[in-house]
Amino acid sequence: MLKVGLTGGIGCGKSTAVQRFRELGVPVIEADLIAREVVAVGQPALQEIAGLFGTQALQADGALNRAWLRQTVFSDPVRLQQLESILHPRIRADILTKIAACSDSAYVIVDVPLLFEKGYTQLFDRILVIDCLPDQQKLRVRQRDGSDDSVIMSIMQSQIEREARLQQAHDIISNTASITDFYEKIDDLNIKYIKLSEA
């Protein structure tokens, strides 16, 4: 079974690509969903976070106080590193478990927004990057989230540079034209991946 890591900059169309692959019957594993699951109430990671950051990391109902935690780690690289050392080994282990459960399929897509930044490349046979122009990224995120340009720029700057991302990709889908064009490219890649898995 071919293991494909999917990534791309914010606003490039990863979610739309994931949705299309699902429509084609491809199993998709989403790192963001796993990241939420590992910090659910009752999970060991949540207790570790509370032990490290104090009770202000939790809401009154015992759930993770995401807004407070994001604010705390965003401005402090050391705290961010501590948080990631709790989360990423668990996320990685869960991804591997979920990949193993898809072994009947020709290939599996694993959507990892920070694939390069957090060192997930070794898990995959191929890396697929969804790409668009920086101006398109800003426009799409602004329309989707209502975020202002300074927030969007800070998120873009926290991600690997576009050129570096493209250089490390095995496959690139450019999402700069119509949705029909985007879907056609994904459909073609689906056929390519099925053939590769049979090779």
Image (tube, helix red, strand yellow):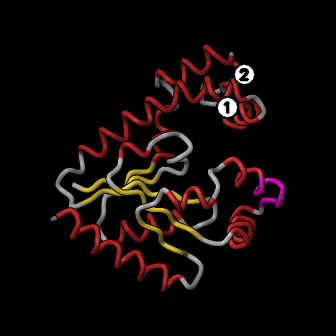
Q: Amino acid at mark 1?
A: Asn
> Going by the image, does 83 lie left or right of 23?
right
Task: List x then y, in percent, for residue 193.
Answer: 28, 67
138 or 134, nearer to the observer: 134
Quadrant location of the C terminus in the rendered image:
bottom left
Do the numbered discs 2 and 1 sit on residues whose CB atoms are within 8 Å? Answer: yes
Q: Which residue is mark 1?
A: 65
Find the distance from the CA under tag 2 to the CA under tag 1.
7 Å
Total number of numbered labels? Answer: 2
Residue 192: image quadrant is bottom left
Badge number at residue 22: none
Task: List x then y, in percent, for residue 164.
Answer: 58, 56
Q: Which residue is mark 2?
A: 56
Mark 1 nearby-residue class (10 Å; few <14, some 14–19, many ≥20): some
Quadrant location of the N terminus in the rendered image:
bottom left
30 or 174, nearer to the observer: 174
Residue 12 to residue 6: above or below: below
SS under mark 2: helix
Mark 2 nearby-residue class (10 Å; few <14, some 14–19, many ≥20): few
Q: Residue at x 21, y 58 (%)?
A: 105
Q: Main SS of the magenta segment?
A: helix
**Sequence-earlier tag: 2 or 1:** 2
Q: Residue at x 62, y 51 (%)?
A: 160
Q: Amino acid at mark 2?
A: Gln
Q: Is residue 151 magenta?
A: yes
Q: What range is drawn magenta here?
A: 147-153
SS under mark 1: loop
62 or 184, nearer to the observer: 184
